[in-house]
């Protein structure tokens, strides 16, 4: 029997595989990753809630459960679906999310992940801020056109990122103390009125208790796109 030939070598196969512990790409310290979720490729909806960085701590929990598939991850309806993380952030944190098929067109404010206590006490990302922009919030919020339906958006300290590229600088600084937990699928304010529910798919998300730098944000974006 002849050995297999052609483009099936280990380097070729490895290049197509997801990055192991993708949430630590770019040399991120494990101590700084508060939570990492990868519903895309999970074994089940229940398994998709696991905090991969610290299983059993800050696992996601359904407020109103989204639908799910191994191909598309969590699928949020833009009206009631949301997940609770139990994580209450402070100033200077980093948050990153990979989304797919989000609703855009200026029809509503859409927030795939966030916490909002009020004013300049917030950490959230808008994929569609109602005026055809992305909203990056870490303290206050800053908006940048165009809106994004599919891709990776993030905020690290006072800088917002779109697909690994810095998209903003000097987001107004954080003040006050957060009292609400980070939600996935909505903005995460107290109650539900005007809470910016997200309509679309979330494939992966991660939260860090430090401000990551550009090279780390680029590496994380690349790793998340391989999930």
Image (spheres, rainbow, N blue to C red):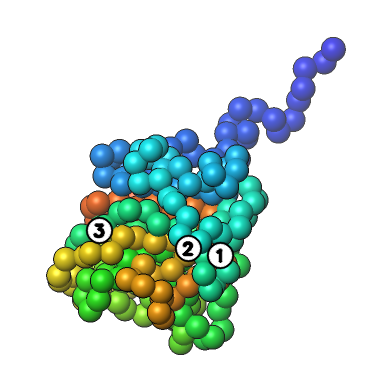
| Quadrant of residue 56 within the rendered picture | top left
SS at circle 1? strand
Find disc 3 in the rendering and name its residue.
Answer: 89
Tell me the quadrant of the picture where the N terminus can be found.
top right
- Asked if marks 3 and 2 touch (Cβ < 8 Å), the reply is no
**Compared to 185, does 203 lie above or below?**
above
Question: What distance separates the C-alpha of mark 3 from that of mark 2?
Answer: 18 Å
Foreground disc of the pair 3, 2: 2
Left or right: residue 15 versus residue 50 is: right
- Name the foreground residue: 169 vs 30: 30
In whole angstroms, how far apart are the C-alphas of marks 1 and 3?
23 Å
Residue 224 visible in the current orientation:
no
Q: In the rendering, at what x and y percent does residue 19 appear?
A: 49, 39
For the residue pair 63 and 162, the one nearer the viewer reads as 63
Q: Would residue 56 be found to the left or right of residue 105 on screen? A: left
Who comes first in sequence, dot 1 or dot 3?
A: 1
Tell me, yes or no, whether the two marked residues, 1 and 2, touch with CB atoms within 8 Å: yes
Crowding at mark 3 (Cα within 10 Å: few <14, some 14-19, many 20+) = many
> Which numbered marker is on residue 76?
1
Residue 82's disc number: 2
Residue 138 seen by the camera: yes
Q: Position of residue 169 (x, y in %)?
A: 27, 72
Q: Residue 180: x percent and y percent? A: 28, 64
Q: Report the label total.
A: 3
Q: Report which quarter residue 57 is drawn in.
A: top left
Mark 2 lies on a secondary structure that is strand
The image shows residue 31, relative to residue 77, as above or below, that is: above
Closer to us: 139 or 58: 58
């Amino acid at each position: 029997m002849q050995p297999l030939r052609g483009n099936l070598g280990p380097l070729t196969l490895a290049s197509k595989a997801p990055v192991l512990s993708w949430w630590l790409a770019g040399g991120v310290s494990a101590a700084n990753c508060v939570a990492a979720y990868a519903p895309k490729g999970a074994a089940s909806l229940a398994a998709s809630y696991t905090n991969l960085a610290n299983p059993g701590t800050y696992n996601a929990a359904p407020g109103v459960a989204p639908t799910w598939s191994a191909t598309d991850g969590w699928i949020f309806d833009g009206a009631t679906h949301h997940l609770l993380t139990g994580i209450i952030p402070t100033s200077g944190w980093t948050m990153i999310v990979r989304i797919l098929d989000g609703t855009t067109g200026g029809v509503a404010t859409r927030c795939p992940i966030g916490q909002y206590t009020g004013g300049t006490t917030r950490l959230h990302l808008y994929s569609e801020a109602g005026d055809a922009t992305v909203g990056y919030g870490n303290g206050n919020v800053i908006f940048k056109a165009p809106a994004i339906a599919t891709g990776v958006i993030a905020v690290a300290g006072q800088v917002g990122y779109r697909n690994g590229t810095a998209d903003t600088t000097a987001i107004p600084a954080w003040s006050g103390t957060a009292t609400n937990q980070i939600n996935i699928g909505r903005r995460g304010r107290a109650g539900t009125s005007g809470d910016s529910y997200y309509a679309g798919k979330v494939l992966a998300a991660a939260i860090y208790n430090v401000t990551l730098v550009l090279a780390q944000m680029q590496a994380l974006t690349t790793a998340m796109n391989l999930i």
